[in-house]
Image (spheres, grey):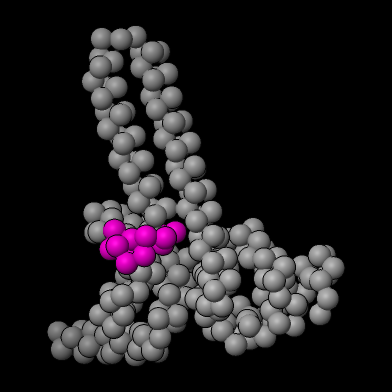
């Protein structure tokens, strides 16, 4: 029985190795698949994949950010913060890492504030204590919302800079990340931005060359065609 268990574990590790190897062939595949694992709640899978990918692509800030996100979602906050900081060291404009760092700092400051207020309010009226706590939580939530909006704004600005610099490969990567994370409003803005600088046919040609996933490409085409019709852009 013991040998059977060991054999099954060994075979299972081979299966995971084979599964990861196909994603490790390119940085783009790693980013897209890690995002899919995170969306599916498979944080351990995402962490294992990005951990292997970091050894192959040690300068890719997005892989560090996604590993941090997987660790963060799995409640491993300290190593997650280390990954986000490494991502920002490589690319200070990394929106994912920036957003999570701001959230971590805001949460930490809120916790310290609430703890301090609780100690001070021992001699106060219970109603007063409750009001102080509610205000603290409201402020923390507001700061988190503002931080997330700033992170999304920086992400969009970085995307536009890539497009204007003709860095269509990285631009397409960001589009796929937006779609995978269901950021539809920013994605719509990116599509409209393309159509203000390129014709519909030119925009589709760019996506056909640089988008990795056929499913994503089909979605992008539909969105472009819909936006082009709405904006009155010629083919």
Quadrant of image for the N terminus:
bottom left
> Relative to the observer, which residue lies in front, 132 or 42?
132
User: Does residue 184 appear in this view?
Assistant: no
In the visual, does 187 lie left or right of 35? right
Please, which residue is most extreme toward the front here? 165
- Residue 30, compared with residue 190, is above or below; it is below
- The region drawn magenta spans 85-96
> Relative to the observer, which residue lies in front, 66 or 235?
235
- Give me the residue at 34% from left, 47% from top: 104
- Residue 44, compared with residue 81, is above or below; it is below
* Quadrant in the rendering for residue 51: bottom left
User: Does residue 190 appear in this view?
Assistant: yes
**x and y percent of residue 59 in the render?**
31, 75
- Give me the residue at 24% from left, 54% from top: 78
Q: Main secondary structure of the magenta part?
A: helix
- Residue 15, compared with residue 136, is above or below; it is below
Q: Is residue 166 magenta?
A: no
**x and y percent of residue 100 in the render?**
38, 53
* Quadrant in the rendering for residue 30: bottom left
How many numbered markers are drawn?
A: 0
Q: Is residue 89 magenta?
A: yes
Quadrant of image for the C terminus:
bottom right
**x and y percent of residue 28 in the render?**
45, 80
In the visual, does 226 lie left or right of 24? right
- Residue 227, compared with residue 212, is above or below; it is above
* Quadrant in the rendering for residue 225: bottom right
In the visual, does 188 lie left or right of 175? right
- Give me the residue at 29% from left, 58% from top: 85
- Give me the residue at 47% from left, 65% from top: 39
**x and y percent of residue 106 in the render?**
36, 41
């Amino acid at each position: 029985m013991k040998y059977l268990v060991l054999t099954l574990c060994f075979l299972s590790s081979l299966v995971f190795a084979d599964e990861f190897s196909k994603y490790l062939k390119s940085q783009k595949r790693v980013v897209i698949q890690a995002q899919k694992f995170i969306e599916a709640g498979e944080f351990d899978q995402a962490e294992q994949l990005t951990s292997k990918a970091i050894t192959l692509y040690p300068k890719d800030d997005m892989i560090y950010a996604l590993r941090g996100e997987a660790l963060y979602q799995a409640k491993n906050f300290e190593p997650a913060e280390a990954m986000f900081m490494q991502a920002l060291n490589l690319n200070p404009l990394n929106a994912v890492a920036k957003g999570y760092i701001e959230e971590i700092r805001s949460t930490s400051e809120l916790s310290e504030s609430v703890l301090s207020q609780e100690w001070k309010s021992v001699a106060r009226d219970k109603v007063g204590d409750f009001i102080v706590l509610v205000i603290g939580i409201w402020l923390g939530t507001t700061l988190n919302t503002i931080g997330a909006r700033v992170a999304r704004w920086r992400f969009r600005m970085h995307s536009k800079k890539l497009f204007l610099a003709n860095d269509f490969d990285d631009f397409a990567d960001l589009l796929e990340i937006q779609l995978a994370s269901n950021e539809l409003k920013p994605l719509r803005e990116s599509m409209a931005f393309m159509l203000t600088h390129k014709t519909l046919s030119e925009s589709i040609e760019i996506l056909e060359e640089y988008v990795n996933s056929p499913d994503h490409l089909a979605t992008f085409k539909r969105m472009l065609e819909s936006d082009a019709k709405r904006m009155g852009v010629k083919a």
